[in-house]
Amino acid sequence: MIDIIINITLLAFLAITSVAIVRMTNLFAIVMLFGIFSLLSAGLFVVMDAPDVAFTEAAVGAGISTVLMLATLALTRNRQKNPYKEAPHAHRPWLPLFVVGITGAVLVYGTWDIPRFGDPNSPAQTHVARYYLENALPETGVPNVVTAVLASYRGFDTLGEVAVVFTAGVAVLLLIGGRRPKQTLKQKDEGEQDET
Amino acid sequence: MKPNLILHVVAKFLIPLIIIFALYVQFHGDFGPGGGFQAGVIFSAALILYALVFGLDAAEKIIPSHILRILASLGLVIYAGVGVVTLLLGGNYLDYTVLGSTQIAGQHLGILLVELGVGITVAAVMLIIFFSFAGRGRV
């Protein structure tokens, strides 16, 4: 019973946050709301007994990515430009609304086939999950089955994930890494303005 | 940022706790929730907090960016190296059983080393990304 109340509360807050994000134009406030959204999702994961996922969501979604977006905002501006300044009359909401309505209806229709939450006969529970739950402790001696699956049974998969993280770091270094001295950047900007 | 006494004191109080928590999540991941990914992110969050409060230059004095680049590669090398070691010991790639005298001991050691590699790479890459973004604003 208490679970249902917590779930409904968290879901309501998630919905309110997303509507607020869509309606706002102050990017600084939107970044803060993104953090709140991630924190609420982390709460939902805890209610669903997935503390490992909640951990990641809280640390990455609410923590690091908020800081990164703030760092990006510091480089740009923290107000959204009005997209309809040029031709406000060209904006007709009916076609997008129609498309969104149809898509939402199809998605809701799709949820009818989803097995109930925690259904022991759902495909996710009957495939390899049973093997992991029964054999992870005797085979690896690790009580946390998530860690056993992540690091041992699916070691190749995790190696690939670490390689992806590493590649992301290399890509950021190649694109915007290194420090540019103040003087040359200023001169470059002035030079570009002169050309235009 | 202007030096702010409250921020400085609170950050100095919080950062050691965050780092200890990161190490706990790292090495207790076998028994409770957590593991290398989460620990790496939490560890980098401690240093990012330091950089936010005390400035980017102070943070880069603790971990210079060239060391971060080495650490980011080191974690991946540890992970892939464990696989190579298991190959040399006669097992399959990333089959930790051959690392120890018993299957449990081998699996335990393998998982610990692999998670350590994950943690080092994730922490280093998060810091690299943060320093790259924040360093751009300073020019």
Image (cartoon, rainbow, N blue to C red):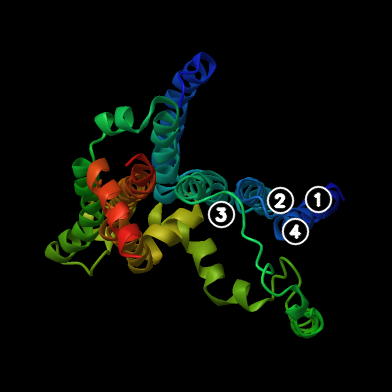
CB under 8 Å between callouts 2 and 1? yes
Relative image position of residue B130 (x, y in whole percent): 38, 45
* Type of amino acid under label 4: Arg
- Gap between marks 4 and 3, in whole Å? 29 Å
User: For the residue labelled by badge 4, is the local secondary structure a helix, a strand or a loop?
Assistant: helix
* Type of amino acid under label 2: Val
Relative image position of residue B100 (x, y in whole percent): 23, 51
Per the image, the residue denoted by label 1 is A3
User: For the residue labelled by badge 2, is the local secondary structure a helix, a strand or a loop?
Assistant: helix
Name which of mark 2 and mark 1 comes first in the sequence.
1
Residue B48 left/right relative to B4:
left
CB under 8 Å between callouts 3 and 2? no
CB under 8 Å between callouts 4 and 2? no
Q: Nearer the viewer, residue B16 or B27?
A: B16
CB under 8 Å between callouts 4 and 3? no
Per the image, the residue denoted by label 4 is A23
Q: Residues within 10 Å of mark 1 (few under 14, many from 20)?
A: few
Per the image, the residue denoted by label 2 is A47
> Which of label 4 and label 3 is nearer to you?
4
* Type of amino acid under label 1: Asp
The chain that hosts pointer 2 is: A
Per the image, the residue denoted by label 3 is A53
> Which of label 4 and label 2 is nearer to you?
4
CB under 8 Å between callouts 1 and 4? no
Q: Which of A11 and B4 is in front in this view?
A: B4
The answer to whether residue A132 is above or below residue B2 is: below
User: For the residue labelled by badge 1, is the local secondary structure a helix, a strand or a loop?
Assistant: helix
